[in-house]
Amino acid sequence: MTRPDDYWAIGDPGPLVRPFAMTRGRVGNNTHKLDILTLVTAVRTKADFSSFDREYEEILQLCQRSPISIAEISGKLNLLVAVTKVLVGDLINSGHLIFRSAPPSTERPDTSLLQAVLDGIREL
């Protein structure tokens, strides 16, 4: 008989191990300075990536039609942003994806615009 305490010993570890396994233990190796707004696009056809792991194939399929952000990829594939950055970085290094990051903003946000947005949200 299985006790509730034994679940983690014999059960499916689920989301606790999977992200670590997908990236093969790599984290924080963001050599391309990818952020959640970085847009990525596939530069190769579907035939060029038929032997990839499932997650790589799914990312490449999402990037085939038009540029898509790291945040959108994470959301559509239900992946952590950190995992998505590692996988996208691998595909950039292999020449399957290209990316474009937003230029850094040197301006401070318009506080009157931010206040108007906040006021509008509060009215909802």
Image: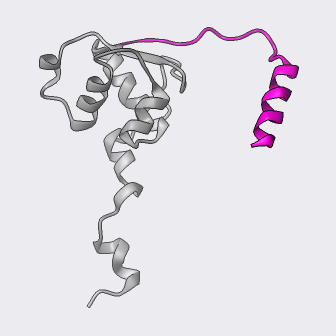
Q: Is residue 66 left or right of residue 72?
A: left
Is 17 covered by the magenta stretch? no
Q: Is residue 102 left or right of residue 4?
A: right
- Per the rendered image, the range of residues in magenta is 98-124
Between 36 and 18, the one nearer to me in the picture:
36
Q: Is residue 63 above or below residue 123?
A: above
Q: Is residue 54 left or right of residue 14?
A: left
Figure coloring? one colour
The residue under the point 71% across, 11% down is 105
- Quadrant location, the N terminus: bottom left
Is 117 covered by the magenta stretch? yes
Please provide percent x and percent y for residue 111. Answer: 86, 21
- Quadrant location, the C terminus: top right
Question: How many numbered circles does the render carry?
Answer: 0
Visible residue check, residue 121: yes
The residue under the point 29% across, 12% down is 95
The residue under the point 82% across, 15% down is 108
Q: Is residue 42 left or right of residue 51?
A: right
The extreme bottom residue here reads 1
Q: Is residue 83 above or below residue 99?
A: below
